[in-house]
Amino acid sequence: MRTRIAFATAAAVVLAAALALSARPAPQAASKRFMNLEDVPKPNGYTHVVTSPAGRMVFISGQGGRGADGKMPADFTTQAENTFRNLARCLERGGATFKDVVKVNYFVTDLANTEELRRVRARHLNMAEPPAATLVQAGLAAGLLLEVEAVAIVP
């Protein structure tokens, strides 16, 4: 009889401990960290290293500047605005937002548009420490001046 009472008491203690542990809030995941190399000047317009907590990764294929009407505007600014609207829609479809983005690649046909690209993207991305690469691409689709791809991590 004592063995049964001792066993029942031990089981109750284990169950109570398990319930107490499961009632605690889950630990918060570390946020993204933006870092640069210490022995070189801080880069202009991007960050050397971004670390992110574990989570679900969302990869967005290159998006261009075609408008909702299906037409390709001729000017860079309108294409850039459309591109970021298209990226936002893709991120939303993947369950992410611009705040979840950890890497962006820009493909431009002319580096002269870099400042305008930065102006437009500043309304969408973390411009203090964006994880980015800008590449000149000679052969984008007909009329396309900009293409942007992104990687996001959703906690």
Image (cartoon, helix red, strand yellow):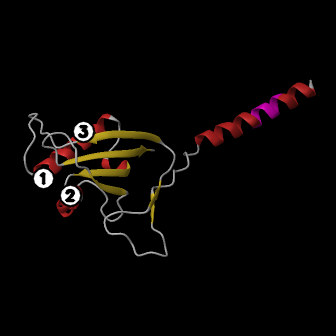
| Residue nearest the observer in this picture, 145 or 131 | 145
How far, Cα to Cα, is label 2 from label 1? 8 Å
Residue 89, label in figure: 3
Do the residues bearing badges 2 and 1 touch, measured as CB atoms within 8 Å?
yes
- The secondary element bearing badge 2 is classed as helix
User: Amino acid type of disc 3?
Assistant: Arg
- Residue beneath disc 1: 76
Residue 12 lies left or right of residue 1; in this view the side is left
How far, Cα to Cα, is label 1 from label 3? 20 Å
Location of residue 10 (image quadrant): top right
Question: Looking at the image, is mark 2 or mark 1 earlier in the sequence?
Answer: 1
Location of residue 69 (image quadrant): top left
Q: Residue at x 49, y 76 (%)?
A: 39
Q: Residue furthest front?
A: 138
Q: Which residues are magenta?
A: 8-13
**Image vertical order of residue 46 relative to residue 124, above or below:** below
What's the magenta bit mostly, secondary-structure-wise? helix
- Eye-nearest disc, 2 or 3: 2
